Amino acid sequence: MTVRLFATDLDGTLLRSDGTVSDRTRAALRAANDAGLVVAFVTGRPPRWLDDVIDETGHIGVAVGANGAVLYDMSDERLITVHSLEPTLMRELGATLRKEFPDVQFAVEYGHGFAAEPGYVHDWEINPRLDRHGRPIPAPVLGDLAAITERPGMKLLAKDRSVNVDAFLDAATDLIGERASITHSSSFGLLEIAAAGVTKATGLAELAVMHDVSREDVLAVGDMPNDVPMLKWAGHSYAVANAHPAARDAADSIIASNDQDAVAELIESLLT
C-alpha cells in the first residue's frame, strides 16, 4: 500500500494502558518521520494535554486535537485552525439534554482552559500543573451552564454516570440532531460535543490538504467511537484489539492491542 500520512489516536491506541510510550513505539515514530511520512496524533485531547505526549514520544508535529476541532502545531504551540461552539448554541444543547437527563453536568473545553459546573466530578487531574516551559496553567473555572458558556468552546462535555454511555450517545444524537457533532471515548457516561460536522475525519482531512496528501494515502489507527469517522474516511484503517465494537466495525483490519505496541508493529511493517 501507499501511505504518506500516518494518523494515530493516542489514549488506548498509541499509549499503553498506563499512559506510557514504549521504547519500541518511540523508535518506530522516529523511523516513520525519517522515512518521510507525515505522522499525526489525532486525539480527543485539547492542546494543553499534548505536552506530556511530546515528552513521552519525542515527536513534535501538527496534531488534530479536541476530536477535530483544532489543528495544533506542537512545536510552535500554536493553534492553526479552530472550529468552535458558540455560547448560545452550547446553552441550547445543554438545556435540551438536561430536560431528558436531569442529572447531567456540563463542562466546556477551551483548549488552554477549562470550565465546569460545580457538580461535574473530574475522573482525572483536569489540568497539568505547568506547561512545557514551567508556566502555570490556569485552574478550572466553576459556574453554572450560563457562566461557563460565556465564550466559544472547542467541546461541550456532558456527564451522567447513571446512564450507559452508548445509550446516552444514541439518545443525545436523537435529541440534538444536526445542531452539533456528538461522540464519546469513555467507558462511562461522558459525551463530547463539537460544532456541527466537526469530527476527527474533518480535522484529519484538513491536515491532509495542508500536506497535499489524498485520503487514499492516509492510514488511521484508533480504538473508540470518536475514531469511527476517521477510520471510515482514511484510505487504510486499523483498530487495535482492545477497541470498542464500533471502532472494530469501522476499520479495515484489526491489529494487536495498545499494550502490545500495535502501532509500532504496524509502522515497522510499512517500512520493511
Image (tube, rainbow, N blue to C red):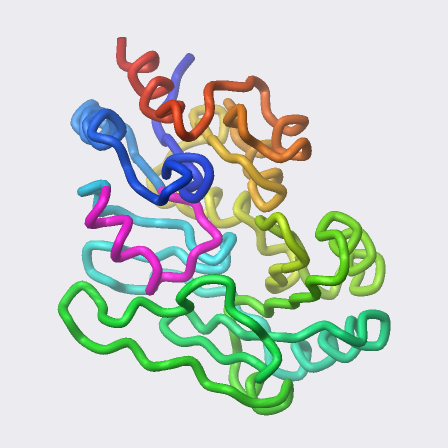
**Residue 77 falls left or right of residue 118:** left
From what the image shows, is residue 136 above or below residue 131?
Answer: below
Residue at x 59%, y 75% (from the top left corner):
120
Identify which residue, 168 or 96, lies in the foreground: 168
Residue drawn at x 42%, y 68% is 126
Q: Residue 247 versus residue 154: which sits nearer the camera? A: 247
Q: Quadrant of the N terminus?
A: top left
Q: Magenta segment, which residues?
A: 41-56
Question: In the image, is residue 146 above or below residue 216?
Answer: below
Q: Position of residue 205 (x, y in %)?
A: 48, 43
- Residue at 64% over, 29% down: 250
Q: Residue 69 in the image: x percent, y percent?
A: 49, 59
- Answer with the quarter of the image where residue 138 lies: bottom left
Residue 33 in percent (x, y) is at 21, 31
On the image, the x and y values in percent for residue 112 come to: 36, 72
The stretch drawn in magenta includes residue 78: no
User: Residue at 18% across / 75% down in the picture?
Assistant: 135
